[in-house]
Image (spheres, grey):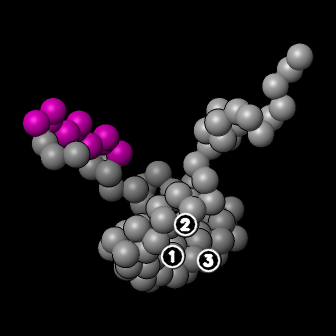
């Protein structure tokens, strides 16, 4: 005859962490400076996101203007910008 489920240790039935463990972990994360760091990162990124949005708008303008000046395009590019940057040495921080 099979054992009824309540006779098994709870740990075998539910290997995933309990609700209490989950909330404890969440509280520990909240107490640590992880969340403020993430918030700070987003605050730092906000101007960057706005800048990228502005740049995207400028790129859209460029795309509109491209056809009539396409033949000039090659001459406008500084030659040094076409050279790929040298790879960073292995010892450099990363």
Q: Name the residue at 15% across, 33% down.
A: 90
Q: Name the residue at 89% across, 16% down.
A: 1
For marks 2 and 1 on the same chain, the one whose residue lies earlier in the sequence: 2
Q: Position of residue 14 (x, y in %)?
A: 67, 40
Residue 42 falls left or right of residue 8: left
Relative to 62, does residue 89 appear above or below in the rendering?
above
State the extent of the magenta-drawn residues as a range: 82-91
Residue 71 falls left or right of residue 36: right
Number of numbered discs present? 3
What residue is disc 1 on? 49
What residue is disc 3 on? 57
Frontmost of labels 1 and 3 is 1
What residue is disc 2 on? 23
SS for dot 2: helix
**Which residue is farthest right?**
1
Q: Residues within 10 Å of mark 1 (few under 14, many from 20)?
A: few
Q: Position of residue 82 (x, y in %)?
A: 35, 45
Q: Nearer the viewer, residue 20 or 75?
A: 20
Q: Nearer the viewer, residue 29 or 80?
A: 29
Magenta stretch, main secondary structure class: loop
């Amino acid at each position: 005859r099979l054992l009824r489920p309540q006779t098994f240790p709870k740990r075998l039935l539910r290997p995933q962490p309990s609700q209490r463990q989950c909330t404890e972990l969440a509280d520990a994360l909240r107490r640590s400076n992880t969340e403020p760091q993430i918030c700070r990162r987003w605050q730092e990124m906000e101007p960057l996101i706005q800048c990228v949005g502005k740049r995207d708008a400028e790129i859209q303008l460029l795309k509109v203007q491209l056809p009539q000046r396409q033949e000039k395009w090659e001459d406008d590019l500084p030659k040094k910008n076409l050279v790929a940057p040298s790879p960073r040495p292995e010892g450099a921080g990363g």
